Amino acid sequence: MKGTLFRYGIFVASGVFILLMSVTSCSHGGGEGTKTEAADAAAFDNPEFDNPKFDEPEYVGSLECKNCHLREYDAWKSTLHSKAMLLPGELSVMGDFETNNRLTVKASAETGKIPKDEELTITMLKRKDKYFVNTIGPDGEFHDYEVSHTFGINSKQSYLTQFPNGALYVLPVQWDVEKQQWFDFHGLASSSPGDGDYWSDAGRIWQFNCAYCHTTGLKINYDLTAEAFDTRMIEPGVGCEACHGPGSNHVKAASFYFDKEKETIINPKNLPWRLSAMICGQCHKSGLSAKEITPHKAGFPERYAFPYDYDVGKPLYNYFVKDPENKVEGGNVQYNEWQQSQHAKAGIICIDCHSVHEKDTKKPVNKSLTKLPADKLCKSCHTSVEKRAAHRIHTFGSCIACHMPKLDGYLPSHTFQFVSPEESLKAGGVDKLMNSCSACHHHKDTELGGLIEFMEAAKKQDMPKPFSAHIRPTVPEPDEKLK
């Protein structure tokens, strides 16, 4: 709005100026008019307007974008991106810190004064407007750790705490929003202080692992001499500039150099399809940074768990190395899965199905913001699919349930491949690998062998007879002995 008003003011002022100059020209002689017109032209012949100088772009924050893009900003505020990291409060904390606020676990290893297999109780507390987790810290003793931020709000929620040196750590409990219960997260049930994977170990420092994809404009700022962090960000959550790049030059262009507006910001829709998908892949991908952590201290991870220094719009693979040991965890690996899909081969990318700027009025806004709800989206492209063989097993014909099963129990797979019960059988059971059929509540307790046989029967029922069945039988030659 501010940019629009400013431009409107320029146009009006220019019109008045030209009108006054015309009147002046009429009131003087021809020579004077020619001089005035020449001076006027020279005034507007400013090389700075023809070739404006822009500095290295900097982050300005989503609120600055709101000034001109109010509709998009308002739609973004209803998405999970804007809530990827929040300050703790009544409207952001999903976990129960007052009633169902205890989690008892067995120590997985000897931990200071705590014997292995001893039961320990972690307590979540709320005191006035602050939230705490009472758990065992790096010294093997119980302490109250104040929650500094929350991240995640849809299926699971985690909690950050800040140590005196500025290091942020994810506390060893997670809240399952759907099941409404607490569970251990890199706590005593799976590790112990000092083993490298305990929640308060140096290898678990949040700034090196999760921070990039829950903030915009992150600056880690680690001082090796002081062994302290002075971490800064332009804003918590995945803001506009996480996908469009730093916006300072765009703001400048929108205020002064109007014909340079599009050139000074990244629009994923205008990029080649692979580069566009990579913008989503910067966070919806598992991998390790091509850049090693510097300065480095003993106990730190070797690399960042995100594409450090990634420039939006550039090839993402230049900022990642492969993770052969699968050290990077996390469920948001849709980009990795998509790369294995037929969609990727056909050039169908994230923004063909999802929109982060439009509220989906046909289902709750805390879902995936697809452009059409569930199966309607699939069938808008897959128009030739008939209800035959496996596609007629269920009368409602759920594309999503079969081709995007929640293999991890939370997030739909983005390989778009049907996962047969036979794959679970080969893997050693559904606890090792979920399949499309067992993921359905109707078949969750059905034996895998029965599901496999049922699928085979359904396929064969509508299957045409093999070609050989239609060939006329050969008439045998008369036996010579019978002649």
Image (cartoon, grey):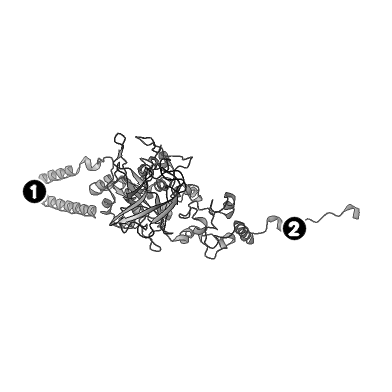
Mark 1: few/some/many CA within 10 Å (<14, 14-19, 20+): few
Which element carries disc 2, helix, strand or loop? loop
Q: Is residue 184 left or right of residue 445?
A: left
Q: Nearer the viewer, mark 2 or mark 1?
A: 2
Q: Is residue 243 left or right of residue 397?
A: left
Farthest residue, direction left: 28
Q: Position of residue 83 (x, y in %)?
A: 34, 54
Tell me, for residue 28, which label it has, or none.
Answer: 1
- Closer to the camera in the image, 426 or 344: 426
Q: Quadrant of the C terminus?
A: bottom right
Tell me, for residue 472, which label it has, or none.
Answer: 2
Q: Position of residue 224 (x, y in %)?
A: 31, 35
Q: Position of residue 125 (x, y in %)?
A: 34, 55
The amino acid sitting under disc 1 is His
Q: Quadrant of the N terminus?
A: bottom left
Whether residue 483 is visible to the viewer of this picture, yes or no, is no
Whether residue 77 is visible to the viewer of this picture, yes or no, is yes
Residue appearing at x 49%, y 49% in the figure: 346
Whether tag 2 and tag 1 are in contact, CB under 8 A, the answer is: no
- Closer to the camera in the image, 147 or 107: 107
